[in-house]
Image: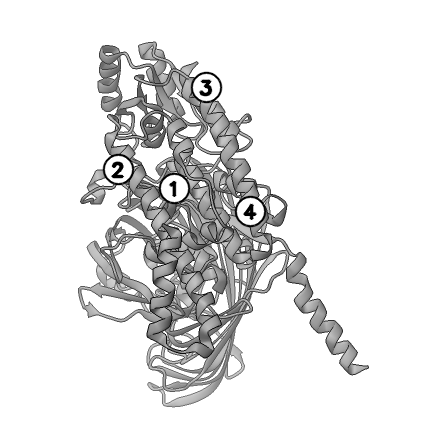
């Protein structure tokens, strides 16, 4: 049969192409083609036989265990036969990077984040509650029921070189484009470029979506220095993963600088720059440590220092992240995490009420530490936040300003996760971050529900 | 002088790959074990998932990303079993060789006939795999197909050792054939079992036994107390030959059911290395089958 096919195939194709000078080359290519076809044919026959066997078996299995199965299998011929089906098989039955569900291209998922909020303060007190000396932006949530957002995620490969991601949170006040970016997949040398609008790789929590946070709200140092939703901005990111014995990722970004607390609210004074390093070590089979510094710098034109002011100058932000995970079994895990932020702003503060402009230099810091313990479908978490830990400098026209007592917050949370796609969280905060000693006892009951494509989680 | 230097450097650069082993990154222990049978001395294998981990619930540790970054070939189970971490690994690895569609992206499920592919599925059914049951590593016939695929993939990447891969495959096939004689002689046929998770369907199909009920009411959903009560009743009435589970799934529930009903609880390794005796894929199967008929 093989010889017969060669006899027919070769002359007919050679005649069609009618190019004798290329005869040898064509002969070789035909040989390859023919090998491939034969291998394919064999594979199909093999699969068919397996299907038939499965059909004929009363249990829907391979019938008499393997014995007949194995002996019936043909012995392999030339090496090319074993080589060819793989390539063919792989291209024929290709499943993509995000899994094989053929129904979803692009892949879609929707995550609904909703919570109940209770506090000992009244709504008016909550609406005017800020972190004096850091930010004049209140949290802006209502007592009672809140729909934080329904986050729509869309992702798919663009082509063999790029993957595209978009995150569109829909809130009661409207729709925004929180993220829309590409990531390269096939650059050589351990390089990767991300471009578009995305959450900056500065620090750890910043790049996480609110539904992936370990607590309902962002740590206090983020809220006071970056903003309660973190820093998502337009620009490009370059990361490099060298082939070292230890995981070390280097990254840098050029961004538009759109951030209320750090640079400017509308992106009118480009650019902001970041640089970060993330290293990781494993200790045995169950423990992993991840740590690294981050840095961001840019021009600042902000109105969030205090109400009725405008600040013009520069911002430098330094961070250090540390995560330790211990997962001895599928039912139990411990995660310890901490981030330290240090912000320096230097420039001029204009006060519109008194129409004066004075030099302002503020150097402030903040830290959070948190620990989570997971047992089966339950998870228990504690967190402690503190600002002005080592550095508390707010020099307006050379004079240190006082904003009351040191801001801190303590948090406890209990989660129940019925499945991978739903989470119920009860959280209590004791918040003393308003500087005036007024304590906010906060209670959250949060529900997170996800449908659609299974998005993979980063570490 | 300069030319000699350039020549030397060029030689060094191009000479290394000839001696270098093919770097295989396998997601699961059984994949690493089979790849080792086919690749033998020509490959260097890194296995990402540890035997004590649940393959459904693995996290992409940075060390896994680093291993994947340097891989010549990534071998995985497929059928969305690794969906929770593999996309992150493949993208973060920044490794062009292992991207989907490349010869270095090896999905073992492409070489097998899949059981239990649902016609329609949603998550009210629990953690049902939309592409079919992914736990085909208990099926000798399918593992042989995967091994053939591996030999082909390795030959494509490393043609100079194609003969070695072919020879290793023949040896593997022969060993499977020998082992099969022993395995099929065991009295597994016609037995009835209860299983904790939908993990043993391929084993049942290949070795002629049936799984009549599951301890999990739905895949991935642990049983409630009332469901356990109901199961005790079922087990007492139907008297199955045993209740199957693995070292990491539902030991507590299975022990409880076994104690209440007097039906034997059977711990089967879920992967190579999950029990001390399951050193490679063969001993993993030996142990699995001998536990069934004990």
Q: Quadrant of residue A376?
A: top left
Name the foreground residue: B208 vs B46.
B208
Q: Which residue is mark 1?
A: B56
Proximity of marks 3 and 1: CB atoms separated by less than 8 Å: no
> Both on one chain, marks 2 and 1?
yes
Q: Chain of mark 4?
A: B
Proximity of marks 2 and 4: CB atoms separated by less than 8 Å: no
Crowd band around label 2 with a 10 angstrom C-alpha radius: few (<14), some (14–19), many (20+)? some
Q: Give x and y (percent) for residue B216.
A: 29, 29
Q: Chain of mark 2?
A: B
Label 2 vs label 3: CA separation?
A: 26 Å
Residue B165 tag number: 4
Picture residue at 43% right of the left edge, 25% below the top: B268
Q: Earlier in the sequence, mark 4 or mark 1?
A: 1
Crowd band around label 3 with a 10 angstrom C-alpha radius: few (<14), some (14–19), many (20+)? some
Q: Which residue is mark 2?
A: B116
Q: Earlier in the sequence, mark 2 or mark 4?
A: 2
Q: Look at the picture and state if A447 lies above or below B34.
A: below
Callout in the foreground (3, 1):
3
Farthest residue in the top direction? B262
Picture residue at 26% right of the left edge, 28% below the top: A57
Q: Give x and y (percent) for residue B281.
A: 50, 33
């Amino acid at each position: 049969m093989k010889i017969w096919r060669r006899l027919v195939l070769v002359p007919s194709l050679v005649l069609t192409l009618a190019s004798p000078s290329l005869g040898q080359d064509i002969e070789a290519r035909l040989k390859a083609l023919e090998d491939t076809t034969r291998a394919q044919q064999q594979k199909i026959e093999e699969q068919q036989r397996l299907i038939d066997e499965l059909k004929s078996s009363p249990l829907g299995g391979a019938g008499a265990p393997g014995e007949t199965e194995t002996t019936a299998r043909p012995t392999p011929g030339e090496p090319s036969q074993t080589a060819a089906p793989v390539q063919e098989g792989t291209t024929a039955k290709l499943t993509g990077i995000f899994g094989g569900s053929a129904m979803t291209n692009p892949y879609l998922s929707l995550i609904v984040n909703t919570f109940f909020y209770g506090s000992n303060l009244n709504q008016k007190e909550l609406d005017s509650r800020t972190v004096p000396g850091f930010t004049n932006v209140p949290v802006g949530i209502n007592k009672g029921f809140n729909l934080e957002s329904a986050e729509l995620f869309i992702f798919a490969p663009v082509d063999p070189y790029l993957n595209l991601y978009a995150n569109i949170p829909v809130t009661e006040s409207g729709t925004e484009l929180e993220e829309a970016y590409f990531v390269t997949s096939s650059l050589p040398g351990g390089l990767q470029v991300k471009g578009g609008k995305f959450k900056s790789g500065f620090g750890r929590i910043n790049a996480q979506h609110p539904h992936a946070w370990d607590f309902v709200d962002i740590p206090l140092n983020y809220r006071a220095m970056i903003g309660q939703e973190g820093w998502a901005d337009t620009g490009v990111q370059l990361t490099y993963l060298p082939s070292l014995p230890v995981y070390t990722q280097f990254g840098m970004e050029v961004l538009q600088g759109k951030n209320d607390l750090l640079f400017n609210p509308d992106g009118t004074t480009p650019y902001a720059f970041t640089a970060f390093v993330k290293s990781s070590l494993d200790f045995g089979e169950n423990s992993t440590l991840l740590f690294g510094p981050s840095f961001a710098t840019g021009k600042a034109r902000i109105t969030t220092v205090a109400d009725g002011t405008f600040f013009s100058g520069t911002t430098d932000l330094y961070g250090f992240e540390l995560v330790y995970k211990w997962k001895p079994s599928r039912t139990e895990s411990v995660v310890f995490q901490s981030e330290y932020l240090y912000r320096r702003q230097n420039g001029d503060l204009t006060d519109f009420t008194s129409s004066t402009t004075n030099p302002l230099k503020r150097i402030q810091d903040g830290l959070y530490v948190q620990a989570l313990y997971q047992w089966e479908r339950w998870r228990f978490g504690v967190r402690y936040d503190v600002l002005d830990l080592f550095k508390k400098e707010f020099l307006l026209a050379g004079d240190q300003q006082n904003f009351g007592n040191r801001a801190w917050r303590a948090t406890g949370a209990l989660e129940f996760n019925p499945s991978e796609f739903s989470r119920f969280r009860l959280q209590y905060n004791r918040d003393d971050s308003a500087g005036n000693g007024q304590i906010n006892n906060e209670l959250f009951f949060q529900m997170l529900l996800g449908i659609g494509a299974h998005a993979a989680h980063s570490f | 002088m300069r030319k000699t230097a350039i020549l030397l450097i060029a030689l060094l650069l191009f000479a290394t790959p000839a001696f270098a082993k093919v770097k295989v990154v396998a997601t699961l222990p059984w994949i690493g074990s089979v790849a080792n049978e086919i690749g033998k001395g020509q490959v260097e294998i890194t296995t990402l998932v540890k035997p004590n981990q649940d393959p459904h619930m693995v996290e992409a540790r940075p060390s896994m990303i680093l291993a994947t970054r340097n891989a010549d070939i990534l071998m995985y189970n497929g059928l969305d079993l690794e969906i929770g971490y593999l996309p992150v690994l493949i993208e973060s690895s920044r490794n062009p060789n292992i991207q989907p569609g490349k010869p270095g992206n090896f999905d073992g499920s492409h070489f097998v006939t899949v059981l239990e592919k649902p016609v329609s599925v949603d998550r009210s059914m629990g953690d049902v795999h939309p592409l079919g049951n992914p736990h085909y590593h208990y099926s000798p016939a399918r593992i042989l197909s995967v091994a053939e695929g591996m030999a082909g993939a390795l030959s494509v990447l490393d043609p100079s050792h194609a003969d070695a891969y072919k020879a290793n495959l023949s040896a593997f096939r022969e060993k499977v054939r020998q082992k099969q004689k022993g395995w099929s002689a065991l009295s597994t046929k016609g037995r009835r079992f209860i299983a904790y998770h939908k993990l043993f369907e391929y084993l049942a199909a290949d070795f002629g036994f049936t799984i009549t009920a599951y301890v999990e009411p739905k895949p991935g959903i642990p049983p409630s107390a009332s469901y356990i009560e109901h199961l005790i009743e079922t087990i007492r009435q139907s008297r199955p030959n045993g209740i199957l589970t693995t070292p990491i799934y539902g030991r507590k529930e299975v022990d409880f059911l076994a104690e209440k009903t007097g039906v034997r609880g059977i711990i089967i390794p879920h992967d190579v290395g999950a029990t001390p005796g399951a050193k490679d894929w063969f001993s993993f199967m030996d142990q699995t089958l001998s536990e069934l008929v004990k």
